[in-house]
Amino acid sequence: MGTTVFKDAKIFLKGFDLSGDHNDLGLNFSSEMLDATTFGNSTRIRKGGLKTADMSGSGFWQGGANEVDDALFNRIGVDNELMTLFGDGINGGTTCAPGYAMKSVAASYNPGGSVGALLPFTMTAMSESELVRAIPLQNATETALSTGATNSTPVEVGAIESGMKLYAGQHGVEFATSTTGARLDMAVQNASSSGASYNTVLNFTQLTAIGGEWGTPVTGPSSTDRTWWRIQSCSCGASVKALGWVGIQ
């Protein structure tokens, strides 16, 4: 894969798609460096400690229901908000160019700028979980899911081996407002081959409005031959735009 022109980043915070509000995005993934130096050493000895992740972004302010001001102002200090980032669009149904996801807490939101300029904002969010490489299986963020059950294209992600976990997340970013009783059900499923029978490994909480969820991680080991994964979605009562991803690490 060659170099990338940074022009199609995607930013999801719970049920909000903030991609069109941002023009700057940064992700910092690091480890604390612990000093293990003892007498007799002639140089500092370091050991990796706890890992940390944080995200920073900036863009142009917009106010109103479900706009960036609504999304960020009301989430300062709120725990366990699913955040998912993609650096070069969403390549659904492939392990190429995965995104990054974490449970986050919004740490800062700063709107304001100079006279005569477009009103800008900056924001930061910090991790409350592992940072996961997110493989998008169900991408219906541009074209809504068909009403009824929909299976994403199977992808061979791998088995949940000993010492590893399955992580998964869902973002429901748009529900048709003209229909009552709209809901979205998503489930993560696996099989031994793309065309074999699938078992449900993880069910997300049903959404009836925009929202997001970091699924409860599934600890390995699991059946080593079940390496193919898909997301089964059921959009009932209205058209829904949504994103579902998995990661094993």
Image (cartoon, rainbow, N blue to C red):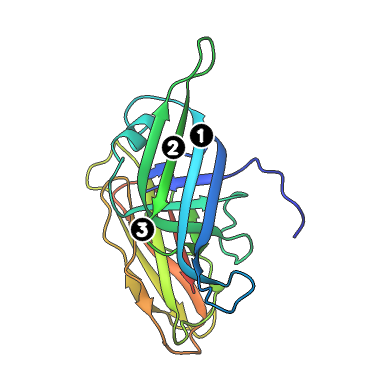
User: Is 162 on the left or on the right of 25, as rendered?
Assistant: left
The reply to whether dot 1 and dot 2 touch (C-beta < 8 Å) is yes
- Badge 1 is on which residue? 58
Q: Position of residue 139 (x, y in %)?
A: 50, 55
Q: Could you tell me if residue 157 is visible in this image?
A: yes
Badge 1 marks a residue whose secondary structure is strand
Q: Position of residue 173 (x, y in %)?
A: 39, 45
- Badge 3 is on which residue? 128
Q: Amino acid at mark 3?
A: Glu
User: Is 182 on the left or on the right of 113, as rendered?
Assistant: left
Q: Amino acid at mark 1?
A: Ser
User: Is 150 on the left or on the right of 8, as rendered?
Assistant: left
**124, 189: nearer the viewer:** 124
- Residue closest to the far top: 116
At horizontal 41% and vertical 87% (from top left) the residue drawn is 222
Categorize mark 3 by other alpha carbons within 10 Å: few (<14), some (14-19), many (20+). some
Q: Could you tell me if residue 143 is visible in this image?
A: no
- Mark seen at residue 123: 2
Badge 3 marks a residue whose secondary structure is loop
Q: Earlier in the sequence, mark 3 or mark 2?
A: 2
Badge 2 marks a residue whose secondary structure is strand
- Residue closest to the far bottom: 224
Q: Earlier in the sequence, mark 1 or mark 2?
A: 1
- Residue closest to the far right: 2
- Classify residue 205 by image quadrant: bottom left
